[in-house]
Amino acid sequence: MEGEYFIPADTEHIAREKNKAKELRRSQWWKRKRSSGQCHYCAESFPPRELTMDHVVPLSRGGLTAKSNVVPCCKDCNSQKQHLLPLEWTDYIERLRQQGAP
């Protein structure tokens, strides 16, 4: 993640999309989506209530709160992914594997 820079989305966009995310988390669609109990990124199993909502394209990178842009994931993966785009996340995980991380 070193040396990677981006211009974050404006605060109004982020606030608006976070409100949409709050509503989406209450929906039956989201409850069904996380009911599998599987993290989208590491594929580990968790109690569904422990899964968080991750924006595949992060809000800070201009992503939207839409069913096509949110996935259930564990807290560890969500914390590690931060503001990374899918390709950047894949590269990050690959670098970790090459360095011998589990």
Image (cartoon, helix red, strand yellow):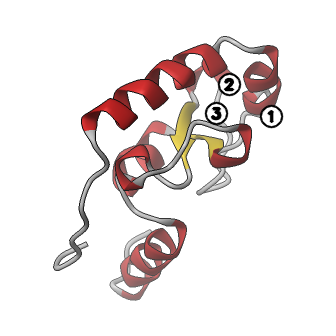
Secondary structure state at the residue bearing disc 3: loop
Q: Earlier in the sequence, mark 2 or mark 1?
A: 1
Q: Which residue is the site of mark 2?
A: 48
User: Gap in Å between the C-alphas at discs 1 and 3?
Assistant: 9 Å
Q: Which residue is the site of mark 3?
A: 46
The structure residue drawn at horizontal position 53% and vertical position 17%, both measured from the top left corner, is 22
Residue 62: mark? none
Q: Are circles 1 and 3 on residues that touch, CB within 8 Å? A: no
Percent position of residue 48, x then y = 68, 25
Say if 8 sits above or below 99 in the image.
above
Percent position of residue 40, x then y = 66, 51
The structure residue drawn at horizontal position 45% and vertical position 50%, both measured from the top left corner, is 58
- Amino acid type at circle 1 is Ser
The structure residue drawn at horizontal position 26% and vertical position 35%, both measured from the top left corner, is 11
Say if 98 sits above or below 27 in the image.
below
Q: Are circles 2 and 1 on residues that touch, CB within 8 Å? A: yes
**Of marks 1 and 3, the one in the foreground:** 1
Percent position of residue 54, x then y = 53, 41
- Amino acid type at circle 3 is Phe
